[in-house]
């Protein structure tokens, strides 16, 4: 049996302020200050963490040059790790021109000016790659160009093969609302087909509004796990519990995938976000997803997870 190695992942969960990009950057920097160089392998920040979808044009960022990219490059270089964060990407002049022509020809006014994207920086502060959200939520569709598919990056151990997604990528294409637990399970099947050992989701996921007295949004945690069913399902009838558990299934010996969900918290334009950033262990054939740890609904802060993979 191969020996296990430590994997160290940090998530930053906070409540960004609308239109206050520099304030949000400063807050993220403050939360990450406690991290020491070479103490972490991957830092995750949520979807569109420095801005929001309302009046988006003034806050669109050029890839590699905007405030989110600058912050990620600085943080990755200081910590000697990888940093993954969401941001509103400005389309190239060619893409924007094409979008304008398409909008005019269709007689509509939904011109695409950007993309709901995420950027990945490496240990020397270098740009590694980026990803555009594939399954757009209703608030994205007025301004964002969808991506052409999910993304996987091959990185040094212990990260190895990482698949990334953004929020509504958990749902099916063209879905504006939560779907049922039934398929298709696009991003889960993609991760399996690319032999990923880690799946990271950057979210700005709304609170379920259920069991509001609970510190954690358990409905949302279970929903996220249900949308990743192929990662843990047991095809034998009656073998699946459906709900997340916090203990191992001793009989499961399938491939394990670590799933990290980094969500934002707080309120924006009358809507409340779920927080509840979490890390799961999902093993094929186990019949149940295992929750390793989670943050609170309203918690702001940095959570570091050290696990063996």
Image: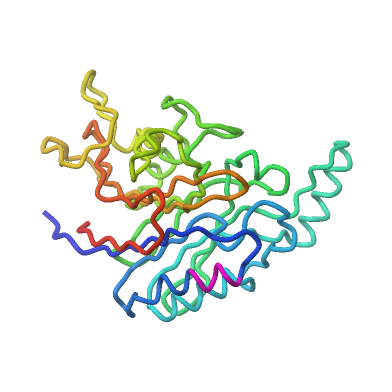
* Side of 276 relative to 18 (left or right): left
Q: Tell me, what colour scheme is on the image?
A: rainbow
Pick the residue in front: 59 or 200.
Answer: 59
Residue 237 point in image, percent of width and height: 23, 18
* Side of 100 relative to 55 (left or right): right
Single out the residue that lies furthest toward the top. 237
Inspect the magenta stretch and tell me whether residue 129 lies in it. no
* Side of 292 relative to 27 (left or right): left
Most frequent secondary structure within the magenta stretch: helix
Residue 87 point in image, percent of width and height: 59, 60
Say which quadrant the C terminus sits in.
bottom left
The residue that appears at 34% across and 75% down in the rendered structure is 35
Span highlighted in magenta in the image:
22-27
The residue that appears at 55% across and 67% down in the rendered structure is 24
The residue that appears at 56% across and 32% down in the rendered structure is 177
Residue 218 point in image, percent of width and height: 34, 38
Residue 224 point in image, percent of width and height: 39, 39
Q: Is residue 260 above or below residue 25?
A: above
Q: Is residue 132 above or below residue 175?
A: below
Pick the residue in front: 157 or 199.
Answer: 199
The residue that appears at 22% across and 22% down in the rendered structure is 236
Say which quadrant the N terminus sits in.
bottom left
């Amino acid at each position: 049996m191969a020996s296990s190695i430590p994997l160290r992942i940090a998530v930053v969960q906070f409540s960004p302020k609308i239109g206050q990009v520099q304030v949000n950057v400063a807050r993220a920097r403050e939360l990450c200050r406690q991290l020491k160089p070479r103490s972490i392998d991957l830092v995750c920040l949520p979807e569109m963490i420095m801005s929001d979808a309302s009046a988006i044009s003034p806050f669109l960022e050029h890839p590699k040059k905007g405030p989110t990219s600058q912050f990620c490059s600085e943080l990755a270089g200081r910590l000697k790790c990888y940093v993954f964060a969401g941001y509103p990407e400005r389309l190239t002049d060619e893409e924007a021109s094409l979008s304008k022509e398409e909008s005019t020809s269709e007689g509509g006014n939904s011109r695409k000016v950007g993309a709901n994207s995420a950027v990945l920086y490496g240990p020397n502060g270098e740009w590694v790659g980026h990803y555009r959200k594939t399954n757009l939520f209703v608030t994205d569709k007025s301004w964002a160009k969808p991506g052409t598919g999910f993304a996987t990056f091959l990185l040094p151990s212990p990260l190895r093969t990482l698949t990334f997604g953004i929020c509504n990528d958990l749902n099916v294409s063209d879905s504006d609302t939560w779907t049922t637990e039934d398929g298709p399970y696009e991003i889960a099947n993609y991760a399996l087909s690319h032999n990923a050992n880690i799946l990271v989701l950057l979210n700005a996921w709304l609170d379920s509004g259920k069991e509001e007295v609970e510190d954690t949004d358990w409905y949302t945690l279970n929903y996220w796990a249900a949308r990743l069913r192929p990662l843990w399902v047991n095809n034998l009838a009656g073998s699946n519990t459906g709900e997340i558990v916090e203990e191992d299934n001793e009989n499961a010996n399938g491939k394990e995938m670590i799933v990290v969900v980094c969500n934002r918290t707080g309120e924006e334009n009358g809507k409340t976000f779920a927080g509840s950033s979490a890390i799961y262990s999902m093993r094929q054939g186990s019949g149940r997803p295992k929750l390793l740890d989670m943050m609170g609904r309203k918690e702001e802060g940095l959570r570091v997870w050290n696990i063996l993979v």
